[in-house]
Image (cartoon, coloured by chain):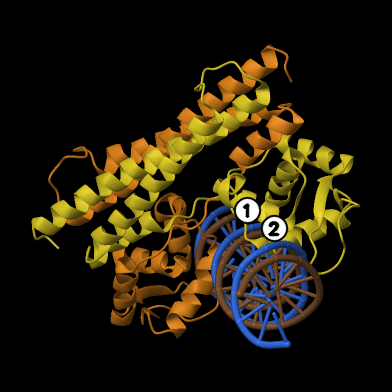
Chain colours: A yellow, B orange, C blue, D brown
Amino acid sequence: MSLPHAILTALLEKPSSGLELTRRFDKSIGFFWSATHQQIYRELGRLERAGHIRALPSAAPTRGGRKAYEVLPAGRAELAAWTAASDEPRPLRDALPVRLRAAAVVGTEGLADELTRHLELHRRRLADYRAIAARDFPEGPDAPGDARTRLQHVVLDGGVRMETFWIEWLGEALEAVRLIETSGED
Amino acid sequence: MSLPHAILTALLEKPSSGLELTRRFDKSIGFFWSATHQQIYRELGRLERAGHIRALPSAAPTRGGRKAYEVLPAGRAELAAWTAASDEPRPLRDALPVRLRAAAVVGTEGLADELTRHLELHRRRLADYRAIAARDFPEGPDAPGDARTRLQHVVLDGGVRMETFWIEWLGEALEAVRLIETSGED
DNA sequence: GAGTCCATGTAATTGGTTACATGATTCC
DNA sequence: GGAATCATGTAACCAATTACATGGACTC
């Protein structure tokens, strides 16, 4: 149930149309809560019906026309309540560890290539995060700055740490798979 | 589309009934691909209809009775194909970074407690993983051992690394939130 | 005015979650 | 033989994914 709250956050940062939100999700908040444009449009409809956001009056209400939304007080209140609420972490679901365990039973054939490919993906994403950090937080993690900037920096740093985790672990996994394949145990 | 493959893996490791699978998911493979008993029963039905598994003949086919399943050659082939196939990582969806960003806009009220709670959850889970590692892989990561054991160890070590990541990041986030709250910027 | 992209949607399907139902077994 | 628990399921719902549809703007 976080998509509406991710959208409220994005709209508070800057009122936007559905497509603008989609683009911003692709390169910012969506790193941590991804969403397609279909999800976003559906959720915008719900939020509007719930009275949490409204279309800016200047927008043309035609089908093909842009519609920009802004957050209403009720939406901000809802977001504040959600931020403070207690919520369990959602259960993890990642295919790669499962594939490694499957390979432990049916053999590692083809797995090294796939691990290498994922390693490369995560390396690229880490580079992206670092580029964003250099652009948006040039003063580094311990710079003073206001509360908002520091929190956003912490979030981005979470992305950096996460990708670093993947890169290290995939390296370990690759090493193990290669060792098994060269020693011919497979 | 990994649940059937997680189940095939578990069944290859050891033929089991639905409830046994549910329990094993709760303390092993489900750390990386969680599933409830309803999902598991549904998937067992599908896998049986697809000819990938079959109920062991010894099992009683009554409603309340246990039914143990084993993997058929077609199921093993399917699992091997899936293990080697190319597959994109599924998009990330985690609420905590979103909540931090929301807090950057609506304030950090209540967030520190929640971060502390999550930190404790991850610490406990890390301790669980380490206990399992000490029990199942007492010789450490560089021990010789067979291919299967080494791969399983790599998977578990992924869990350890993952929890370590969370603990470190949550620590950083907590520090930032506390700094903001004590300096009264909120 | 045909073709292409831009922007907003609808529809169908799948996977996951929550709540409930029912037969078998065990324990007193 | 009644209650609790074990084990297997069904049903309804919701979120996410995939594929497709439609109106408008811009371009040649």
| Chain under disc 1 | A
Q: Which residue is mark 2?
A: A19
Which class describes the residues within 10 Å of circle 2: few (<14), some (14-19), or many (20+)? Answer: some
Q: Is residue A141 left or right of residue A51?
A: left
On screen, residue B177 above or below B143? above
Q: Nearer the viewer, residue A58 or B134?
A: A58
Does residue A100 appear to the left or right of A157 in the view shown? left
Q: How many marks?
A: 2
Foreground: A9 or A58?
A58
Q: Tell me if I can see residue B125 in this picture.
A: no
Can you say which quadrant of the picture contains the C terminus of chain A? Answer: bottom left
Determine which quarter of the picture holds residue B95.
Answer: top right
Mark pair 1, 2: CA separation: 6 Å
Instruction: Report helix, strand or loop for mark 2.
Output: helix
Q: Is residue C10 above or below residue C7?
A: below
Picture layout, residue A87 above or below residue B89 = above
Horizontally, is B34 left or right of B138 in the view? right
Label 2 lies in what chain?
A: A
Q: Which residue is mark 1?
A: A23
**What element does badge 1 sit on?**
helix
Residue at x-position 71% and y-position 27%: B108
Amino acid type, callout 1:
Arg
Please state which of residues B175 and D18 is positioned toward the viewer in this rendering: D18
Q: Residues within 10 Å of mark 1 (few under 14, many from 20)?
A: few
Q: Residue at x 63, y 53 (%)?
A: A23
